[in-house]
Amino acid sequence: MAIIPADISPAVIEATLRTRLIARPLEVVAEIGSTNDAVMGAGRAGRAEGLAILADRQTAGRGRRGRSWASPAGVGLYTSVLLRPQLTPAKMPLLTLVAGLGVAEAVEEIAGVATRLKWPNDVLVEGRKVAGILAEMASVDEQVGHIVIGIGINVNHGPQDLPEELFPAATSLSLVTGSRIPRGELAAAVYNGLDRWYQIFRQRQIEAILAVGRERSATLGRPVDVLADEERWQGLAVDLDADGALLVREESGELRRVVASDVSIRTPAVQGT
Ligand code: BTN
């Protein structure tokens, strides 16, 4: 049977956990299919908001748009958190932003590197992806029933741990910093960050969330390619709207709202911005 490594033991994580809600309780497992699937099931079973599951390894880690998320043992952070906000599905991008802000701040605090957010869910360091967020919901009568926020961070991955097709767009914190990052402290900082921003969200301080989201954005002001289900188009990313959706101006001048598409930045990000 696989054993939970000491650096992500519950005791190590709880030593710096300062949350009111998030990761209360926290379940750490050595191996799982997908933490998102496990937390979605826990939500269906009526478990309370705040539950977090963290795994050392996932055998069926999932990314956005049906992609897989490489989740080797010993190097990454793979966790999902159960939330029960009062929310309509249209506001899901806002919750992804809330999670993104928590993760970005945690990475800055523990790894000492500057981060930016690529809409809707990537955390970038030096223009390359170090973390992704997969927000999934169970809806009931047009309302959101419960939400699972899945967070994957490339922490101590060497080049051999990252899928070849992701180079050079993805990297890990240890590849960027040249040092080993303490996964347990990073996990606690992620839960602390998520707890802080989720409280702000629950207090309906939406403008504060959007203001920091705009400031941290790697996407705004950039020419982007938007890949929707059947359509690919281009424009300039100009703003976030009140629901966290991306507003993109087409060459024709038309302003379009992007909610659930893939967006890629057409010009390379400037280092450190
Ligand atoms: C993405 O950028 O495509 C989102 C990646 C999200 C990966 C995390 S790892 C923990 C959680 N469990 C999963 O199966 N996926 C998310």
Image: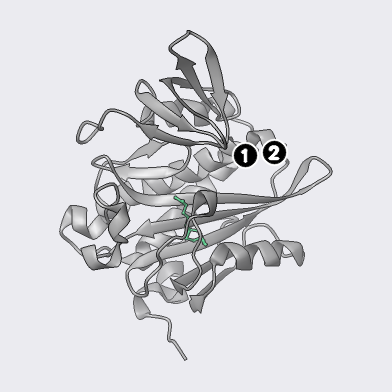
Three-letter code, disc 1: Met
Q: Amino acid at mark 2?
A: Pro
Residue situated in front as seen by the camera: 166 or 211: 166
228 sits to left or right of 212: right
Which residue is situated farthest in the left direction here? Answer: 178
The residue where tag 1 is placed is 92
Displayed quadrant of residue 51: bottom right
| Quadrant assignment, res 153 | bottom left
Name the spot of residue 142 as percent of width and height, x first: 80, 40
Q: Position of residue 253 (x, y in %)?
A: 48, 8
Residue closer to the observer: 115 or 172: 172
Residue 24 visible in rendering: no
**Residue 83, visible in the rendered structure:** yes
Picture layout, residue 155 above or below residue 131: below
Marks counted in the figure total 2
Which mark, residue 89? Answer: 2
Q: Is residue 95 left or right of residue 237?
A: right
Give how far across and how far down residue 137 sits, in percent: 67, 50
- Pick the residue in front: 200 or 29: 29
Q: Residue at x 41, y 29 (%)?
A: 225
Q: Secondary structure at mark 2?
A: helix
From this viewpoint, which residue is outermost toward the top? Answer: 253
Q: Quadrant of the C terminus?
A: top left
Would you place residue 273 above or below residue 239 in this image? below
Circle 2/circle 1 CB separation < 8 Å: yes
Residue at the (46%, 68%) spot, across then down: 14
Name the colouring of the figure: one colour
Q: How would you rate the neighbour count of disc 2 (Cα within 10 Å): few for under 14, some for 14-19, many for 20 or more?
A: some
| Mark carried by residue 174 | none
